[in-house]
Amino acid sequence: MGLAALVAGVGLLCWAGVAGSVWLLLGASVVAGIGQGMAFLGAMTEINAVAPPERHAEVLSGFYVVTYLGTGIPVLGVGFLATAIGLLPAVEWFSAGAAAAAIVLLSALLRQPSRSPTAKVRPEARPGQRSTSGDHDATRAANSRGAG
C-alpha cells in the first residue's frame, strides 16, 4: 500500500507542477509522505522478521545507511539537474523515475508468495546451536507419545 501511495503522490506532484497549484502540491506531499512512511515501515517490519538475532543490529544499521543515501542522493541529483534543465522538468523527471521504481518494487512484491503478516520467520539453528524457534523435538516427541 505504501508503494502504491508513493506512486500516487509523485503522480500528483507532477500534476501540481503542470497545473501550478499550491494546494495540489500540498496534497501530493501528504500522499507521497504517507506512502514513503508506509513503505519504510513495511521494510523495517520485514527486516525485523527475517534478520538473524545475532546480526540484527548489523542488518538494521545497513538498512539505515541505504535508506539515508536513498533519500539524500536523489535530492542532490534533482538540484544538479534543475540547474541544467530547470526546476519543473527536473522534478518531473525525478517523479517519473521514483514512480517507475516504486511500480517495479510493487510488482516484484506482488509476485512473491504471500506470507501471513503475523507469521514470524526465524532462522534455523546451526549444528551445535540451540534453535531460536523453541524446542520442536521435545514437542514432537510428546505429541507422538500421546497420539499412540
Image (cartoon, rainbow, N blue to C red):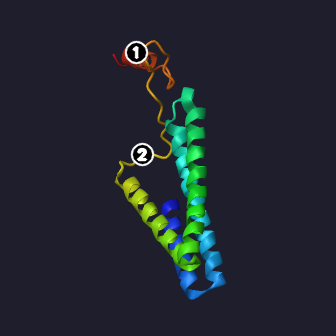
N-terminal of the pair, mark 1 or mark 2, is 2
Q: Tell me the quarter of the picture where residue 106 sits.
A: bottom left
Q: Provide residue 89's location: percent of width, then percent of height.
A: 52, 78
Query: Would residue 63 be seen by someone viewing this image from the given angle?
Result: yes
Front-most of 117 and 126?
A: 126
State the residue in front, 25 or 84: 84
Side (left or right) of 123 relative to 19: left
**SS for callout 2:** loop
Q: Nearer the viewer, mark 1 or mark 2?
A: 2
Which residue occupies 61% across, 65% down?
33
- As drawn, 98 above or below 116: below
| Residue found at x 54% / y 74% | 84
User: Residue 103 vs residue 94: left or right?
Assistant: left
Residue 26 horizontal/vertical position (percent): 65, 76
Q: Nearer the viewer, residue 56 or 138?
A: 56
Tell me the residue that label 1 is attached to.
141
The residue at the far top in this view is 128
Name which residue lies at 53% across and 65% down: 6
The answer to whether residue 1 is seen in the rendering is no
Vertical side of 64 occupied by 85: above or below? below
The amino acid on which the numbered mark 2 sits, given as a three-letter code, is: Arg
Separation of marks 1 and 2 at Cα, in angstroms: 28 Å
Number of residues whose C-alpha sits closer than 10 Å to that of mark 1, classed few (under 14), some (14–19) or many (20 or more): few
Q: Are marks 1 and 2 in contact (CB under 8 Å)?
A: no
Q: Is residue 36 above or below residue 136?
A: below
Query: Please, what is the three-letter code of the amino acid marked with disc 1?
Result: Ala
Left or right: 91 in relation to 142: right
The residue labelled by disc 2 is 115
Residue 32, horizontal then vertical, whole percent: 58, 67
